Image (cartoon, rainbow, N blue to C red):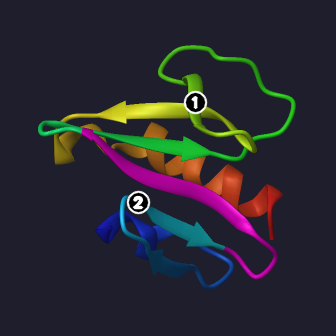
Amino acid sequence: MAAIGQIRDGEVVVQARKTYVSLVSRRRTFARIQPTTKSRVDLALRLEGRKPTGRLQPSKIHETMKLQITLSTVEEVDSEVLDWMQLAFDENS
């Protein structure tokens, strides 16, 4: 959640739900954080026209968010993850 403050050029609204957290730009939801196991969360991203590559994996979290990054530790939220989050924010703002 601390990484959300690093997304530039706009406000992000955090919407806590029963089983996940949505990250919403001015226009629409661009990411969803969902616990998958006791030791892992999945960060689903709305990135249109991108294929799974590297850390981006196919996602089944939501039909509009076809890609996800699996995170097991806070240290895994690195510059690559922040860049993907920023890109998703920019594309959906």
* Mark 1 burial class by Cα count in 10 Å: few <14, some 14-19, many 20+: few
For this rendering, which residue is in front, 32 or 49? 32
The residue at which mark 2 appears reads as 20
Is the stretch drawn in magenta largely helix, strand or loop? Answer: strand
For this rendering, which residue is in front, 33 or 53? 33
Helix, strand or loop at disc 2?
loop
Up/down of 21 relative to 61, above or below: below
For the N terminus, the image quarter is bottom left
The residue at which mark 1 appears reads as 60
**Residue 36 drawn at (x, y percent):** 30, 37
**Residue 73 drawn at (x, y percent):** 16, 40
Q: Residue at x 58, y 56 (%)?
A: 31
10 within the magenta span: no
Up/down of 3 relative to 5, above or below: above
**Residue 72 drawn at (x, y percent):** 20, 35
- For the residues marked 2 and 1, what is the alpha-carbon distance in whole angstroms? 14 Å
Q: Tell me the magenta residue range.
A: 25-36
Q: Residue at x 71, y 47 (%)?
A: 46
For this rendering, which residue is in front, 62 or 71? 62
